[in-house]
Image (cartoon, rainbow, N blue to C red):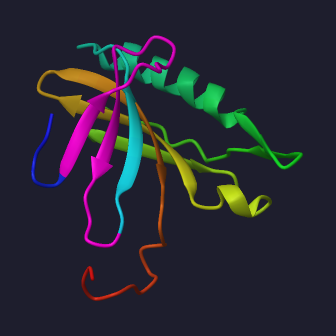
Amino acid sequence: MANPQAIEFESKVSAQEAIKCRVIKYSSNTKDVYSCEAEMPKSEVFEETSGKFRAIYNSLQHFSVEINGINAFFKADFIKPTESIKFTTIVFDAGGKTPELKKLKIALLLESEMLEWVIKIQVYEKEREDKEKGPEKDE
């Protein structure tokens, strides 16, 4: 699927229990940016979905990657979702221990879509912190 800002590809690699996995290519004048997203089964019951959200958080909190013989663990503080707030995001990072993973982020999202709750897991590379200054326009 394509639109002016991005092209979405269905992924053959899938996360456990995911109903849909995709790779998204965002276009830019300077360089293309990619992310991966896994969408978990939807539910109308908030308590059920928030329980799965906590279970996935616990799994990701122990996720490790080995780079050049160094183990990096992705960590994030838990944010308890509430039904009145329709969007909760927890962003995991590997800290500064491995420079190769400094920009790699894993986001766990719980959001309301119409009358259902959905959990998404996103993997992306964050170019810079929001407070960092960059070029005023793409070159």
| Location of residue 11 with respect to 32 vertically, above or below | above
| Location of residue 71 with respect to 139 vertically, above or below | above
Range drawn in magenta = 6-30
Residue under the point 74% across and 37% down: 64
Q: Position of residue 50 (x, y in %)?
A: 42, 23
Left or right, 93 with respect to 126, comes to right
Left or right, 94 with respect to 25, comes to right
Residue under the point 55% across and 24% down: 56
Which of these two is toward me, 107 or 83? 107
Residue under the point 80% across and 60% down: 97
Can residue 95 be seen from the camera position used here?
no
Left or right, 95 with respect to 6, comes to right
Q: Position of residue 47 (x, y in %)?
A: 38, 17
Left or right, 107 with respect to 85, comes to right
- Asked if the magenta segment contains residue 61, the reply would be no
Numbered marks: total: 0
Residue under the point 40% across and 45% down: 35
Which of these two is toward me, 60 or 138? 138
- Asked if the magenta segment contains residue 11, the reply would be yes
For the C terminus, which image quadrant? bottom left
| Residue 12, picture quadrant | top left
Which of these two is toward me, 102 or 31? 31
| Residue 114, picture quadrant | top left
Can residue 75 be seen from the camera position used here?
yes
For the N terminus, which image quadrant? top left
Q: Position of residue 28 (x, y in %)?
A: 26, 65
| Location of residue 64 with respect to 138 vertically, above or below | above
Q: Position of residue 16 (x, y in %)?
A: 51, 14
Q: Residue furthest right?
A: 69
